[in-house]
């Protein structure tokens, strides 16, 4: 009973030959993504405090308005792309939203005008661009061999080639590597820190959704 509620579609929305759906599993992911989108909308950036070593002195960093607006926009857009990846019932659309998430995560990181942070954003950008190749190659192989990209139909036939699944997995791993580069750049100490939470959330939910799709098809 529990497995049926968790795995069976609770809601479907046909859009041509593409069917968006929510199951018990994806409802949980959707709720997390929607919650963090709302937080990105209503949150104000923190003012980082730097302590002067050896003294009691400290100073706060003011957040430029243009930086705050850009990071907020990119965080909201990343949350929406994550919701798209969670609800789509089409393999190609999933890979497309995964690529969007990677691009938007670059924007969130690169918004900080700091050489160390920008170097990390550039390195992550290279990884994202390379990851799109196996990501879309996997979807293309599934379309060519199975004649469909519908997750629902592929779940019934189970005909998706193993090589296609592995390519999609490699692509998702590349797109979701943003938290590693954030840690490398120590961006959590940079202005606008709350908005980078969307990077961690989007990467985690992208991995969880990818696991569900690859086990299904």
Image: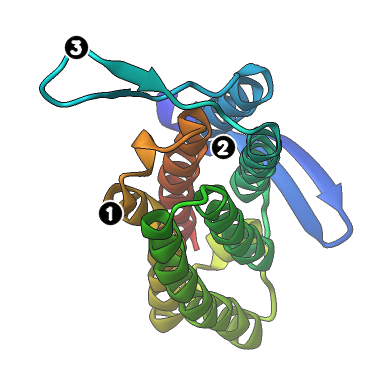
Give above or below for 27 relative to 136. above
For disc 2, the marked residue is 8
Disc ID at residue 56: 3
Q: Which image quadrant is residue 80 in?
A: top right
Q: Secondary structure at mark 3?
A: loop
Residue at 46%, 27% in the rendered image:
61
Give above or below for 194 relative to 202. above
Please identify, in this view, whether the residue under mark 1 or under mark 3 is nearer the observer.
Answer: 3
- Residue 53 spot, x, y in % from top left: 15, 26
Residue nearest the viewer, comparing 9 with 74: 74
- Residue 108 spot, x, y in % from top left: 55, 48
Disc ID at residue 199: none
Q: Secondary structure at mark 1?
A: helix
- Residue 37 spot, x, y in % from top left: 63, 29
Give me the C-alpha separation between circle 1 and circle 2: 40 Å
For disc 1, the marked residue is 184
Question: Is residue 181 rendered to the left or right of residue 191?
Answer: left
Please identify, in this view, whether the residue under mark 1 or under mark 2 is nearer the observer.
Answer: 1
Earlier residue among tags 1 and 3: 3
């Amino acid at each position: 009973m529990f497995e049926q509620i968790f795995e069976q579609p609770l809601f479907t929305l046909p859009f041509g030959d593409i069917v968006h759906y929510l199951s018990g599993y994806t409802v949980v992911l959707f709720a997390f993504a929607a919650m963090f989108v709302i937080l990105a909308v209503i949150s104000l950036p923190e003012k980082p405090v730097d302590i002067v070593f050896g003294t009691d002195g400290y100073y706060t960093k003011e957040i430029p308005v243009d930086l705050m607006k850009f990071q907020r926009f990119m965080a909201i857009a990343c949350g929406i792309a994550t919701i798209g990846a969670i609800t789509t019932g089409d393999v190609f659309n999933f890979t497309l939203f995964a690529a969007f998430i990677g691009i938007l995560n670059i924007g969130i990181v690169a918004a900080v005008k700091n050489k160390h942070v920008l170097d990390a954003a550039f390195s992550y950008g290279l990884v994202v661009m390379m990851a799109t190749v196996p990501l879309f190659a996997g979807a293309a192989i599934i379309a060519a061999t199975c004649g469909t990209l519908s997750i629902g139909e592929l779940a019934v036939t189970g005909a998706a080639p193993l090589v296609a699944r592995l390519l999609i997995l490699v692509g998702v791993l590349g797109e979701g590597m943003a938290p590693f580069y954030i840690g490398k750049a120590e961006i959590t100490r940079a202005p606008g820190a709350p908005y980078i939470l969307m990077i961690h959330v989007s990467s985690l939910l992208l991995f969880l959704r990818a696991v569900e799709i690859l086990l299904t098809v």
